[in-house]
Image: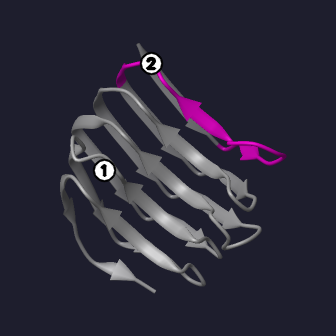
Amino acid sequence: MQLTITGSQFAGSGERIILNGALASLLMSSNLIFVAANQIGLALNAIYGQVSIIGNNFSGMSVSGSFGINVNATGYTCVVTGNVFYGLGNGINLLGASTGGWIVALNNYSGSTNTVLNVGSNTVGTITQ
């Protein structure tokens, strides 16, 4: 199964986007995601084939416990680049030791407390403040 999320805005209470099922490919680009305190903008909790998260704006309403992207999944070809993580407690959290295959580079983390938390075996490139 494939999923494309493009040109949308997500706001309100609770996690914004939660994906619990495996996908062959995910393309997410040009979205505006508002993240409240103790909430997650995008939660990925399954095995993924190809993931491209490019050019999105994750805007924190509070740095308290907020996450732009929270990954607890293995990916085979996964790229997170060109995104803005503004005013968040945590920009990207590659949280599980089982996470692998993620390439994170050339994102902006202005006003965010932590940029990338990398617990698994992933490639984290240039971090732009």
Q: Quadrant of the N terminus?
A: top left
Q: Which residue is mark 1?
A: 79
> Residue at 66% of width from left, 44% of height from top?
7
Q: Is residue 34 magenta?
A: no
Look at label 1 and name its amino acid: Val
- In primary-sequence order, the first of circles 2 and 1 is 2
**What span is in magenta?**
7-24
Where residue 83 sits: x, y (%)?
A: 49, 63
SS label for mark 1: strand
Q: Is residue 14 magenta?
A: yes
Bin the neighbour count of mark 2 within 10 Å (Cα to Cα): few under 14, some 14-19, many 20 and up. Answer: few
**Quadrant hosting residue 2:** top left
Depth order, front residue of 6/16: 16
Q: Main secondary structure of the magenta part?
A: loop
The image's mark for residue 113 is none
Look at label 2 and name its amino acid: Gly
Where residue 45 sits: x, y (%)?
A: 42, 32
